[in-house]
Amino acid sequence: MPMYVPPAPSAALRSVLAALGSPTAAVRGVRSRTAAYGTLRPELPLPVHVLTGITRADGPPSPRLTGWRFLLRGNDRAVGTAEARLTADGWAFSHFGEGPYVRSTETALRHAEALPTPYQPRLLSVPELYMLTLWLHSDATADPAGGTLLPADLLMPLAPAPPGIAASVPHRVGALLPLLTHRLVPSPLLQTPV
């Protein structure tokens, strides 16, 4: 089933394109990747949401939009990422990225395309666990800036995932969030008496 990839804000895309063409991009290693892989093209914009406070008792956590991440494609493969962040003045280029999450994101997106239900792909970061997931939002036509986790949503942890959490496997929100919460709540046996 096709995924509904929402368009990134045009200012976010412009900031990434400007950064790719900037002379300072050479300092960031982009020029060497361009030499190795040809012209780099930003593709598959994914809204990046951050989920914090997952152990709070006052209800389910609410993710917040922090940016848009683009896969950088060169020679028909993803070779890095470029991210734009929302600032007080609007969308601005944030940083280039590389590493295992590039390939892992591509793998997770391929798995998601094979699912029978249409989803809107997003990225969900759980900084408390140093974890990044592909968030498959079940309301495929929703505003990508909205941050409500729905019961029918799937979370697919990207590799490398924290120990004990399977990467590239879709989990229902209601199944994965309690597992993450459990990992963050200290065990009474490990607490030091006061």
Image (tube, rainbow, N blue to C red):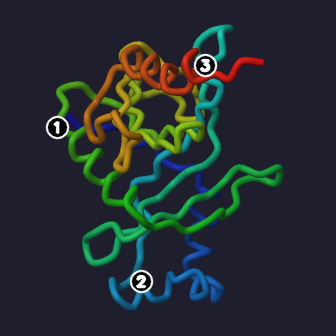
Closer to viewer: mark 3 or mark 1:
3
The quadrant holding residue 37 is bottom left
Q: How crowded is mark 1: few (under 14 residues within 10 Å), some or many (20 or more)?
A: few
Q: Do the residues labelled 3 and 1 touch (CB within 8 Å)?
A: no
Q: Of tags 3 and 2, which is closer to the observer?
A: 3
Q: Which amino acid does label 1 sit on?
A: Ala
Percent x, y of residue 115: 19, 31
Which quadrant of the figure has residue 63?
Answer: top right
Circle 1 is placed at which residue position?
114
Query: Which residue is located at x 35 percent, y 51 percent?
Result: 105
Q: Residue at x 61, y 75 (%)?
A: 19
- Amino acid under label 3? Thr
Q: Which residue is at the front of the view, 28 or 8? A: 28
Question: Which callout, 3 or 2, points at the residue further toward the start of the chain?
Answer: 2
Return the mark for residue 55: 3
Q: Which quarter of the picture shows residue 155?
A: top left
Q: What residue type is labelled 2?
A: Arg
Q: In whole angstroms, how far apart are the C-alphas of marks 3 and 1? A: 32 Å
Task: Give the answer, above or below, for where 13 lies relative to 191.
Answer: below
Front-most of residues 69 and 128: 128
23, above or below 90, in the image? below
Q: Quadrant of the C terminus?
A: top right
The secondary element bearing badge 3 is classed as loop
Count the labels in the image: 3
Comes first in the chain, label 3 or label 1: 3
* Residue underneath mark 2: 33
99 versus 121 height, above or below: below
Secondary structure found at label 2: helix
